[in-house]
Amino acid sequence: MSDDITFSIIKPDAFSRGDAARILFRIAEAGFTIAALKMIHMTRAQAEGFYAVHRERPFFEGLVEFMSTGPVMVMVLRHPDAVERFRSLIGTTDPAKAAPGTIRAEYGTTVQRNAVHGSDSAENAFKEASYFFSAIEIF
Ligand code: IDP
Ligand code: MG
């Protein structure tokens, strides 16, 4: 794995509304290929582990609660400059401020329930992908 991968989650809000396939289509249309993909329902402890870097933030409790409310789709995506390209495709954290046409603008509802996750660096993409997938599951 290298700079050409990022890690993403279709979060419980989008997944429970049945938007996962539409979001996947947007991702594919933008030229990303899927290197790994599965559906999981995170326990609270698994969500806490994933978001450990945010544990001191005021939104942490609400975030891990939300992320463990229902199934999500976790995936590894491949594209040149994947991290940067994917963050542009999804838009900024708050859907209300995300650029028109971005996935969060279209499918997110609040700053917490913003439909998708995207890694913020190549290093974190590798760590996050490794949290959910073993090396032989990433194509
Ligand atoms: P990012 O997902 O755009 O990288 P981060 O700052 O890494 O944003 O925050 C992780 C996640 O925590 C966000 O995607 C969002 O679901 C949630 N979050 C961030 N800031 C807030 C907030 O101020 N209130 C509620 N939830 C938040
Ligand atoms: Mg982040």
Image: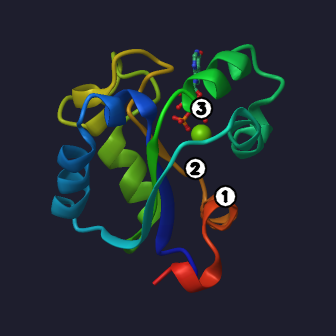
Q: Give whichever of 50, 42 is nearer the camera.
A: 42
Q: Is mark 1 within 8 Å of ligand 2?
A: yes
Q: Gap between marks 1 and 2, in whole Å?
A: 7 Å
Q: Residue at x 78, y 39 (%)?
A: 53
Quadrant where the N terminus sits is: bottom right
Count up the numbered dots: 3
Q: Earlier in the sequence, mark 3 or mark 1?
A: 3
Q: Gap between marks 3 and 1, in whole Å?
A: 21 Å
10 Å neighbourhood of mark 2: few (<14), some, or many (≥20)?
some
Q: Gap between marks 2 and 3, in whole Å?
A: 21 Å
Residue bearing mark 3:
68
Residue bearing mark 1:
124
Which residue of the protein is positioned furthest toward the right in this rendering? 56
Q: Residue 78 at x, y = what percent?
A: 40, 73
- Contact between marks 1 and 2 (CB within 8 A): the answer is yes
Q: Earlier in the sequence, mark 2 or mark 3?
A: 3
Q: Residue 83 at x, y = what percent?
A: 48, 59
Tell me: 99 left or right of 54: left
Q: Tell me the number on the disc at residue 47.
A: none
Residue bearing mark 2:
120
Q: Is mark 2 within 8 Å of ligand 2?
A: yes
Q: Amino acid at mark 3?
A: Ser
